[in-house]
Every structure is written in structure tokens, then in C-alpha cells.
Image: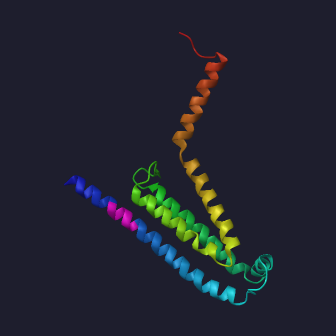
Amino acid sequence: MDIRTEENRKWWAFINKVLLILGGWSLYLVVFAQCYKEIVFYLDKQANGLIQFLFLLTYSGYEILWLTIGYVIMLLGSMLLLLWNPRTRKLKQMLSKQEIVLSILLILVALVPIGTRMWSFFLMAFVFAFMLGFIVCILFRQEENFAIAENEDEAVSNYCGTEKRN
């Protein structure tokens, strides 16, 4: 009976994660769609990419800034929500099959704004968010970093002949 409740608790935690991520991304995409309609209405479709980019920066810079900041926050929050283990308060070492599928879907949803006319902003934000996520994952795995540093210290001391002899 205890195993069943533990399994149910894991499923409810996973469902809560999924609902939180879906709710956040759906709210973001609704706001994105409204802003996108307003921004693209004034955009010249016949102009080349650089002219469109400069036009967007000049006349819609404030809206694009908030959209890209929201995009980075949603990506980082979703990644950390998937990787964070609340019991141990550390990053997970292994992801379950469901979490792997959810992370693939998260990447696909994150690629949706890249298919728009403002693709350059979101491509930079996408790369920036995953770079920050990668750095956070490396920094939070302190146990592995300390183990690697100890192994390197042992190898250096053994090579230099400074090992203690009994």
C-alpha cells in the first residue's frame, strides 16, 4: 500500500509540473500573439531581413524587450522545474521517460516564436536561455565538481612524488 501511495504522489507531482508549465506557456503565447499582431501590422513585408530587424528595433523595441525577457524566464523556469528535485533540493541526475518527453515538447514549444518575423530576437533568447541553463546545471552539481578536483589533486601529488609513505 505504501508503494502505491508513493507512485501516486510521483504522478501527481508530475501532473502538477505539466499543468504549471502548460499554463505558463499558454499565457505567454497568448500575450505573444496579441503583441505580434500589433507589431507585424506596421511591418513592411517586402523589405529585406535587415530592414525589418532595424524597423522592429526602432519602433517596437520596448515590446520586443519584454517578450524576449518573458521568453527567457519561461525557458529557464520550465527547465529548472523539470530538473529540480524538491525532496533533495538538488538537480536530478536522471530524468524519467515522461520528463524526457515533456522536455522535448518544451523545446518544440520554445521554437514556435522562432518561426515568426521576429525570429532573430527569439533565436538569440533561445540560445541565451539554454546557455544559462547549462551553466546553472554545471554550477549546481557541486558534489561532482569536488570529486573531480580531489581526483586531480591526487593525480598531481602522485605524479610529483609527494605522496605520503608509511
The quarter holding residue 76 reads: bottom right
Residue 59 location (% of width, % of height): 76, 84
**Which residue appears at 67% of the width and 73% of the height?**
119
**Which residue appears at 58% of the width and 83% of the height?**
33
Residue span colored magenta: 11-16
**Which residue appears at 72% of the width and 82% of the height?**
60
Residue 50 location (% of width, % of height): 79, 76
**Which residue appears at 64% of the width and 24% of the height?**
156
The quarter holding residue 15 reads: bottom left
Residue 75 location (% of width, % of height): 56, 66
The reply, left or right, for residue 62 in relation to residue 21 is right
Is 87 rendered above or below residue 49? above
Residue 138 location (% of width, % of height): 58, 48
Q: Is residue 39 magenta?
A: no
For this rendering, which residue is in front, 121 or 10?
A: 121
The quarter holding residue 120 reads: bottom right
For this rendering, which residue is in front, 91 or 118?
A: 118
